[in-house]
Amino acid sequence: MRENVGVVRTRSVYANMKDPRFMKYYYKFQAIEKVARGTDVSGSSPPDIFVGRFGYPNVFIGPLVPPEFGDTTIMSAPEQWVGKSMEDIVKYRSNLIRGMYRTKVSNADNGRIEQMITELAIADRYSTVQELLKHKPVLKMSFDENNQPYGPSAGLKGMSIDNSKANPQIEKAYFDTSMNARTGIVELYEKGIVVSKIQKSLSAGVLGVGKRRKYVPTRWSITAVDDTLGKHKLKSVKEYGPLDAIRVYKTVGLDNRWLVIMIPGSWEYELVEAWYPNTTWNESQVNIDIFSSYEPFTGRKTYAEIGGCYYAARLASTELLDKIKRQAKVVILREAHPGYVMPVGVWNVREHVRHALRGDPIILESIAQLFGLIRSNMDIPIPTWIQNSTLLKTYLRQKRLN
């Protein structure tokens, strides 16, 4: 067994396209090309937008529009996807056709198309959008663990929006040009705006101080919001007293297994992921790859090796601790099994950890009981988890000293 700890995962999944399990989903993405035969695409955007990162500070912005009308909200609502199958998620995302318009990140809201992207990002419900494309949309399959996938794309010549209605809370933040982006993110969150909507607002340059507002590539905005909100929650969590017993929460989804372990003590946090052969980030035929990222009470000074998933899981954990007014040492164990052949976005981590934490915890009295629970719910052997976990190794060492 091979443990690759501290590997930054930035690979695409082109290699997996040879896998027959992946191909059935690829064909579903490809099928939308047959529907979008021309260069004029009209439909109800969920609403959703995408801001690319290649060529930064000159990036592609544009709407995501399905060639269908009606309530398409579910296509861009990851908070509602827990319990959905991979087929469901592919169905939602493959229908979204991306228009691509090149602009400078500093041009947020400073042109006709730019203003319509702002309008779409602020919209409170699905809106009718017409995309005039430069050519027939073409499917280009390249996924990563941060972004949700989408269907075929093409250069954008022009667009129009009808029936859009602004979310009053986001609109208020948009018109407040003296409020910095960090404050805007926190205020929207505390007013009940879902995380995915805040991420789109940041990406579209809706938040920030006056002329300093910029487009933020979608990939970056997702992690920025998770990180900002997690740190915001931690300010309160670190002031609470510790848990009085070990708590474990568990869930399963998309052939991923999750254990969220909370141990009495001062705040520490770690995410440990085990990727089985022929999964997204492990093309090996025989070895299991294990990745981990950790932070002490004082926090991290560098970007997490695991990437955006780390910050998504941390946010979910701090939400629960803030709710119960306690702090703890948090270890999240994830096994990604072979059925997880295609990345669907960081939401998968955030929302499944949230889902686990909405359930009743298993209360344990000893580390021996904890290891027994891990053994009965996960396939990776206990010594391997310990070997790849800074927090578990430290905790065991401290227990022996006691």
Image (cartoon, rainbow, N blue to C red):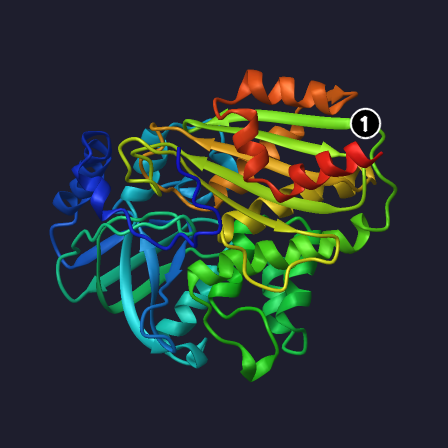
Which residue does the numbered mark 1 point to in the structure image? 245
Please state if 122 lies on the left or on the right of 25 as rendered. right
> In front: 186, or 269?
269
* x and y, in percent, of residue 211 in the image: 55, 84
Q: Is residue 360 something one can see in this rendering?
A: no
> In front: 237, or 69?
237
* x and y, in percent, of residue 319 in the image: 70, 43
Instruction: Give the quarter of the figure containing the N terminus.
Output: top left
Residue lying furthest bottom: 211
Relative vertical location of residue 185 with respect to residue 252 in this rendering, above or below = below
Residue at image coords 20%, 34%: 19
Relative vertical location of residue 169 with respect to residue 44 in this rendering, above or below = below
Residue at image coords 63%, 47%: 315
Residue at image coords 81%, 36%: 401
Q: Quadrant of residue 160?
A: bottom left
Q: Quadrant of residue 242?
A: top right
Considering the numbered disc 1 on the image, is that residue within a helix, a strand or a loop? loop
Instruction: Give the quarter of the figure containing the C terminus.
Output: top right
* x and y, in percent, of residue 61 in the image: 35, 67
Please state if 315 lies on the left or on the right of 85 as rendered. right
* x and y, in percent, of residue 42 in the image: 26, 53
Please state if 37 lies on the left or on the right of 84 as rendered. left
Number of numbered labels in the structure image: 1
Q: Residues within 10 Å of mark 1 (few under 14, many from 20)?
A: some
Q: Is residue 332 something one can see in this rendering?
A: yes
The amino acid beneath tag 1 is Ala
